[in-house]
Amino acid sequence: QVQLVESGGGLVQPGGSLRVSCAASGSIFSINDMGWYRQAPGKQRELVAVITNGGSTNYVDSVKGRFTISRDNHKNTVYLQMNSLKPEDTAVYYCYANIWLVGGSTGDYWGQGTQVTVSS
């Protein structure tokens, strides 16, 4: 019913920038929170950033001042602009969205993940 498709991951040098995107499609009535999680090898998945329907944002402390989350409600898309990247930012990044479906039900949906590698 709903798909979240991510794009924009890749390899970047320390100090570099990267933007990842996630577009939701399907039987969507409206989208509440959208956000990004990441999971590094051997570590638990952690919340990186979240943005509400109204545009309020929250970030994990380790990315504050470096990452910016934004969304385009017309395109049902969330973005994560990552600047001043560090090797410790290396992880698979997953987008998620809390979605009201046409028909009235709601649920959390996840993207397939996109690899971000920060290395020289």
Image (cartoon, grey):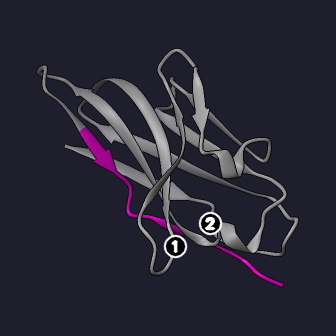
Q: Residue at (56%, 71%) from the top-left corner?
A: 91
Q: Which residues are magenta?
A: 108-120
The residue carrying mark 1 is 40
- 22 above or below 112? above
Where residue 9 appears, as percent x and y from the top left, is: 62, 66
> Taking 15 as reference, is 106 left or right?
left
The residue carrying mark 2 is 9
> Is there any visible trace of residue 20 in the rendered image?
yes
Q: Residue at (58%, 20%) from the top-left corner?
A: 55
Could you tell me which quadrant the C terminus lies in?
bottom right
Q: Nearer the viewer, residue 80 or 45?
A: 45
Farthest residue in the right direction?
A: 15
Where residue 108 appears, as percent x and y from the top left, is: 27, 40
Local secondary structure at mark 2: loop
Mark 2 vs 1, N-terminal side: 2
> Taking 115 as reference, is 104 left or right?
left
> Is there any visible trace of residue 11 in the rendered image?
no
